[in-house]
Amino acid sequence: MIIIILFFLWETHQFVKIYQSVFQFQHNVDQQFPIFIKRIFRSTPEVKYLIIDLKLWFLEDILIIKRSKSTYRRFIY
């Protein structure tokens, strides 16, 4: 049980790093989407299904932020 929790936390940490990489370049947000999608599907299958809904929810959030530059800037800073 502890191993599963630690693995899930590690995978979540990896996801946070991926999520931050999407916002790494403010002027190249569009180019970051394919990289984000590729990294999702590189996850191990066991974890992928546990957290893919969370990742898709974040993707929806990114799309909303992308629509408005002012919202995007408020999110970054």
Image: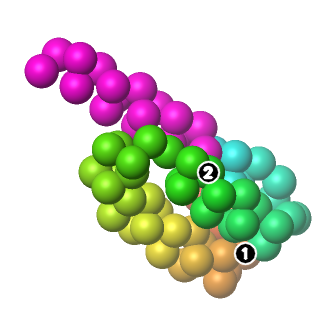
Residue type marked 1: Lys
- The quadrant in which the N terminus is found is top left
Q: Could you say where residue 6 lies in the image, as x and y percent from the top left?
A: 29, 20
User: What is the residue that sits farthest to the front in this orientation?
Assistant: 45
Q: Secondary structure at mark 2?
A: helix
Q: Amino acid at mark 2?
A: Arg
Along the line of sight, the residue nearer the viewer: 56 or 39: 39
- Of labels 2 and 1, the one closer to you: 2
> Where is 5 relative to 22, above or below?
above
In the foreground, 46 or 11: 46
Q: Position of residue 51 (x, y in %)?
A: 34, 52
Res 67 quadrant in image: bottom right
State the predominant SS element of the stretch in magenta. helix
Q: Which residue is mark 1?
A: 69
Where residue 27 sits in the image (x, y, percent)? 87, 64
Magenta-colored span:
1-18
Left or right: residue 17 compared with residue 15 = right
Give the labeled residue for mark 2.
Answer: 39
